[in-house]
Amino acid sequence: MSCRRGALIVLEGVDRAGKTTQCQTLVQALQQSGRPAEIMRFPDRTTKIGQLINSYLEKKSNLEDHTVHLLFSANRWEMVPLMKQKLEQGITLVVDRYAFSGVAFTSAKPGFSLEWCMKPDVGLPKPDLVMFLQLNPSMAANRGEFGIERYETSDFQRTVSQRFEELMQDSSINWKVIDAARTIEEVHKDIKLLSEDILSLAENQPVGELWK
Ligand code: TMP
């Protein structure tokens, strides 16, 4: 008999909303309660594609806008076999950004529609839960290190926020909005409760296909 699958949980939000800290804290909490869980993040800067993206984000190289969008998507697709394997092994994946960031960031650039941006990611493993850490872009700008990498300007992040709002209208995705302006502990409490609820629901269902 095959074991129950793990859940695919995604954290999204504008830059500096606290996603990375919350992903790490959630994985620790799940592990401590005896549930196998691992963190993943996109972009995964360790692969060859990821290194191209990293150099672009650090402004060490320039890439054409469509090209970099497709690289971000390819960087997710290259991890799909590993993701499926882990989920089937019963490991819950807590993912720091996913296709939603891909769409929100590229479509914040002039001339890019949501529809075009979504296409390359159609069919990726569908998250069981997507938690959006909501934080006013001007509050995010006051948090540390804002402004070092490409995209880290308040104006751009404001447009990214609007694109996320549009993506959240899609009821085929299990979106939950989390107020990220609170303390790390308060935010974690909400995230942990929502995640625990989804684990038992996901284990009895096959992994879905995103935007299909
Ligand atoms: P990070 O700071 O979480 O490592 O994310 C790197 C930046 O890349 C961040 O500004 C969001 C952006 N991004 C995209 O533009 N497209 C994508 O598909 C992803 C995953 C991130």
Image (cartoon, helix red, strand yellow):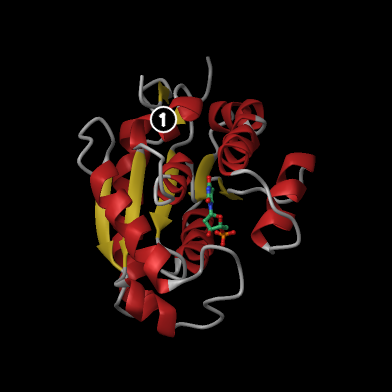
Q: Residue at x 35, y 37 (%)?
A: 114
Q: Quadrant of residue 119?
A: top left
Q: Amino acid at mark 1?
A: Trp
Viewer-side residue, 182 vs 134: 134
Q: Residue at x 52, y 83 (%)?
A: 144
Seen as rendered, the residue at the extreme right is 48
Seen as rendered, the residue at the extreme top is 1
In this view of the protein, can residue 4 be seen by the observer?
no
Q: Is 183 positioned to the left or the right of 81 in the image?
A: left
Q: Residue at x 28, y 35 (%)?
A: 173
Task: Characterize the local packing of mark 1: few (<14), some (14-19) or many (20 or more) Cα atoms within 10 angstroms.
Answer: few
- Dot 1: what SS? helix
Where 187 sits versus 6, above or below? below
Where 6 sits versus 154, above or below? above
| x and y percentages locating residue 62 in the rendered image | 70, 53
Q: Is 1 positioned to the left or the right of 44 in the image?
A: left
| x and y percentages locating residue 131 in the rendered image | 33, 52
Q: Which residue is mark 1?
A: 116
In this view of the protein, can residue 87 be seen by the observer?
yes
| x and y percentages locating residue 31 in the rendered image | 53, 54
Q: Residue at x 40, y 27 (%)?
A: 210
Q: Quadrant of residue 209?
A: top left
Tag count in the figure?
1
Viewer-side residue, 14 vs 20: 14
Where 141 sits versus 202, above or below? below
| x and y percentages locating residue 94 in the rendered image | 50, 48
Quarter in which the C terminus is drawn: top left
